Image (cartoon, grey):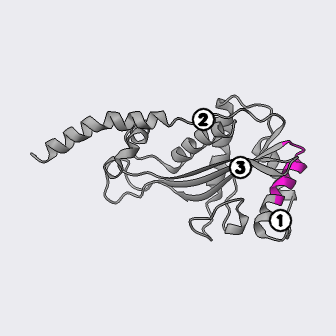
Amino acid sequence: MKRFIPIFLVCFLILPTLIGCQSKSSIVKLPRPVGTVAVAGFTNPVFNWELLAGYLPQEGNPIDKKVLEQLDTKLVEILGKHGVTGYARPAITRQCQEIEVFENMGTRREAAFSYWVKVGECMTSDYILVPQILFWQDLRGMKQADLNIQPASVVIDLFLIDVNNKRIVRRFHFDETQQPLMENMLQAGKFFERGGKWVTGLELADEALQNGLMELGL
């Protein structure tokens, strides 16, 4: 008990500072893209060659299609909250995603990029937003303290592609595995923003999309 009191006092004294540090690193909202925007449905690259950038945490690990549908719904919901209107929704853009195919463009990464440009051209849009879920691990166990809990872990990439000039103009990368407060005091701000509890994978994805879309100007 005597040892617990000093630890508690240290936490009490440093938490306001840590939370203050977290609040200073606010998300920077970029200007909204000028032109028409098509929003692709979430895809789940299973192999590295399907990515536009980076590498998968684990290849050959497909995610349940129901999760992709939930992410599409969440994406549209947050775009609405941000006041984004007049864009082609994932349900419409998916038609072009099904029409276009990957072609051998010299390197596989070039093939992936060329594919998304062609989807944007199919949609006759100036920009196309490409959301990809690279890793998904949902919360397992009780939301209260539990030694056997499996925390939620999510890796999401968002790309904004300029279709006319054929280039990626903006990218947002989110890689988060929730940790207990005592394991990472520097993340105290996030801990309290999440209500001081374990969150689900969809709640982490919500956080990723809220911040990511703002950084992309959407």
Q: Nearer the viewer, residue 19 or 68?
A: 19
Question: Could you tell which of marks 1 and 2 lies nearer the N-terminus?
Answer: 2
Question: Could you tell which of marks 1 and 3 lies nearer the N-terminus?
Answer: 1
| Picture quadrant of residue 109 | bottom right
Q: Amino acid at mark 2?
A: Val
Q: Does residue 76 appear to the left or right of 163 in the view shown?
A: left
Question: Could you tell which of marks 2 and 3 lies nearer the N-terminus?
Answer: 2
Q: Amino acid at mark 3?
A: Phe
| Picture quadrant of residue 115 | bottom right
Q: Where is mark 1, residue-wise?
A: 102
Q: CA distance from mark 2 to mark 3?
A: 16 Å
Magenta span covers which residues?
114-126
Residue 190: % across, % down: 43, 41
Q: Which quadrant does the C terminus fall into? A: top right
Residue 38: % across, % down: 80, 43
Magenta stretch secondary structure, dominant? helix
Q: Where is mark 3, residue-wise?
A: 159
Residue density around tag 3, few if under 14, some if 14–19, many if 20 or more, within 10 Å: many
Residue 184: % across, % down: 36, 50
Q: Does residue 176 appear to the left or right of 167 in the view shown?
A: left
Nearer the observer: mark 2 or 3; the answer is 2
- Measuring 15% from the left and 46% from the top, which residue is drawn there? 4
CB within 8 Å, label 1 to label 2: no
View extreme (left): residue: 2
Q: CA distance from mark 1 to mark 2?
A: 34 Å
- Measuring 68% from the left and 40% from the top, which residue is drawn there? 216
24 inside magenta stretch? no
Q: Amino acid at mark 1?
A: Phe
CB within 8 Å, label 2 to label 3: no
Q: Nearer the viewer, residue 2 or 133?
A: 2
Q: Where is mark 2, residue-wise?
A: 28
Asked if residue 5 is positioned above or below residue 109 in the image, the reply reads above
